[in-house]
Amino acid sequence: MKQVDALVQRAASMGVDVSVPQAEAMIGILDRMAAEPQNLSSAEAMANGVDVHLADSLSGLLLPEVREAEGIVDLGSGGGFPGLVLAIMLPETPVTMVESEQRKADWLTRASQGMRNVRVVADRSESLARTERGTFPVATARALGPLPVVMELAAPLLRPDGVLVAWRGRRDTVSEVGGPAAGDALGLVHRGDVDAAPIPGVSRYFSLWTKAAPTPDRFPRRPGMAAKRPLA
């Protein structure tokens, strides 16, 4: 119960209202994750899971683009952050979690059991774009890679006027400077950056992009190319 209370208070300090049942569900995911025989997260991150995983994911709800989303596709969901947290907090919002690594996709399926608004896709984002192109109102991505890579994977999946919400760490000109050039190629326009500090002493922000024009059919390129040869 101590962790549950800590999460409720931590969320309140950020301006996010989390109920006790919601906090219990999120802490339950952390507990189950820690009990998994496979390493889904680093030991350091798990030791500080309330901040590193949960508060960081909850910070997305400070954005109306996320809070009011009609549907979310979470790219590279990994251990389930922010996807599982958003699904718990937004039970009426369909959340599709995309994870290409089978063991992680299997974990997501187990962890989301009973969540009627969750779908787990055990595939690459590039493959999903061939079957569900232009269908999602919001795409989220956390710890997925350099910004141009995230943009290439997200843009084809977004519907017109859809929004990419990319969780970013310390501002790094090497990985971030290519955003505008990638946006020009993909039909994305920079909506702005929003600072977020869910973890004391850790620099975090959101990079927001709007689907302002159709993404050319040549994107995304074949699996792995976005990371191997970034657009910018």
Image (tube, rainbow, N blue to C red):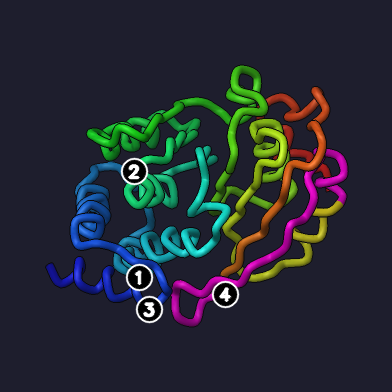
Disc 1 target residue = 11
User: Which sits in the foreground, 91 or 144?
Assistant: 91
Residue 8 counted in the magenta span: no
Q: Amino acid at mark 1?
A: Ala
Label 2 neighbour load within 10 Å: few <14, some 14-19, many 20+: few
Q: Are marks 2 and 3 in contact (CB under 8 Å)?
A: no
Note whether 89 is above or below 168 in the view shown. above
Choose mark 2 or mark 3, whichever is in front.
Answer: 2
Stretch in magenta: 181-203
Q: Is residue 110 left or right of residue 42?
A: left
Distance from Cα at disc 1 to Cα at disc 3: 5 Å
User: Which sits in the foreground, 143 or 151?
Assistant: 151
Q: Which mark is residue 13?
A: 3
Choose mark 4 or mark 2, whichever is in front.
Answer: 2
Q: Percent x, y for residue 71?
A: 50, 38
- Disc 2 is placed on an element classified as loop
For residue 157, what is the image quadrant? top right
Disc 2 target residue = 91
Tell which circle, 4 or 1, labels the residue nearer the N-terminal end. 1
Q: Are marks 1 and 3 in contact (CB under 8 Å)?
A: yes
- Disc 1 is placed on an element classified as helix
Distance from Cα at disc 1 to Cα at disc 2: 18 Å
Q: Which mark is residue 203?
A: 4
Q: Is residue 200 left or right of residue 211?
A: left
- Disc 4 is placed on an element classified as loop
